[in-house]
Image: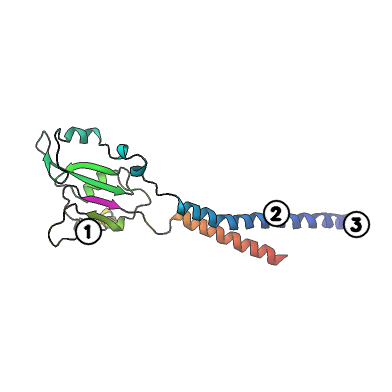
């Protein structure tokens, strides 16, 4: 008799617990797409847009090598030690975007070090070098696989940099680990909800 009472008491509790879990899963299933849409619709976040003066400010060493007189951005200039220097612009998914003063013989590997490397969202396979003044019959944009250089050290795909060239390291459009985890969690929630509904 007592066991029948216990069974009759626990059965409504189980049913209520299932309803609560099903409700939570339903809320998660409905809310997840809205959270993803909100994240995708967020404005492009770039330190260049937030505070351009700070992003473009040079380091002390760069300021000391910059000429004290006006120099066109598309020309070479020298420092007090006779080094031939030039300006290059680096934009996109790097630690220190902005305008940098580098030596004339700097290549993409050097620029990568100057900007402190790329962040996790960077697409290193499609780095673009955009010419400020392309030569006759030269394309305006060159695409370089910088990931290959980082893996093998091969610089054969590099293009020579010229004054005021712009290097763009774009954002990777592929699925990140966080997005895969989000979609997996959503799928598990839906399957669990379907299982609980069918079980009743």
| Residue on which the image places disc 3 | 1
Disc assigned to residue 75:
none
Judged left or right of residue 86, residue 180 is right
Quadrant of the rendered image containing residue 114? top left
Judged left or right of residue 65, residue 40 is right
Quadrant of the rendered image containing residue 19? bottom right
- Image spot of residue 137 (x, y percent): 14, 62
Q: Quadrant of the N terminus?
A: bottom right
Give the CA distance from mark 1 to mark 3: 84 Å
Q: Which of marks 3 and 1 precedes in the sequence?
A: 3
Q: Secondary structure at mark 2?
A: helix
Q: Residue furthest right?
A: 1
Could you tell me which residue is drawn at 16 percent across and 50 percent down? 162
Q: Front-most of 109 and 159? A: 159
Q: Which of marks 1 and 2 precedes in the sequence?
A: 2
Judged left or right of residue 181, residue 109 is left
Mark 3 nearby-residue class (10 Å; few <14, some 14–19, many ≥20): few
Mark 1 nearby-residue class (10 Å; few <14, some 14–19, many ≥20): some
Q: Quadrant of the C terminus?
A: bottom right
- Image spot of residue 81 (x, y percent): 10, 34
Vertical arrangement, residue 89 with respect to residue 189, above or below: above
| Residue on which the image places disc 2 | 20
Q: Main secondary structure of the magenta part?
A: loop
Asked if the residue at tag 1 contacts the one at tag 2, i.e. Cβ–Cβ closer than 8 Å, the answer is: no
| Residue on which the image places disc 1 | 142
- Image spot of residue 21 (x, y percent): 67, 55
Could you tell me which residue is drawn at 26 percent across and 56 percent down? 128
Q: Secondary structure at mark 3?
A: loop
- Which residues make up the magenta segment? 160-170
Q: Examine the structure image and report whether residue 94 is included in the region drawn in magenta.
A: no
Q: Secondary structure at mark 1?
A: strand
Q: Examine the structure image and report whether residue 161 is included in the region drawn in magenta.
A: yes
């Amino acid at each position: 008799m007592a066991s029948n009472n216990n069974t009759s008491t626990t059965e409504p509790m189980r049913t209520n617990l299932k309803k609560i879990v099903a409700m939570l899963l339903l809320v998660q299933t409905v809310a997840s797409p809205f959270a993803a849409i909100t994240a995708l619709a967020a404005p492009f976040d770039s330190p260049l847009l937030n505070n351009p003066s700070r992003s473009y400010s040079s380091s002390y060493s760069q300021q000391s090598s910059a000429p004290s007189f006006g120099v066109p951005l598309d020309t070479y200039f020298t420092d007090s030690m006779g080094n031939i220097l030039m300006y290059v612009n680096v934009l996109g998914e790097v630690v220190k975007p902005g305008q940098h003063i580098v030596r004339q013989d700097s290549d993409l590997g050097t620029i990568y070090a100057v900007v402190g490397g790329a962040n996790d969202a960077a697409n290193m396979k499609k780095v673009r070098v955009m010419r400020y003044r392309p030569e006759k019959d030269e394309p305006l944009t060159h695409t370089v696989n910088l990931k290959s250089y980082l893996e093998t050290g091969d610089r054969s795909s590099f293009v020579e940099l010229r004054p005021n060239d712009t290097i763009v390291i774009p954002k990777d459009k592929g699925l990140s680990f966080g997005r895969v985890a989000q979609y997996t969690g959503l799928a598990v929630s839906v399957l669990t909800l379907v299982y609980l509904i069918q079980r009743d």
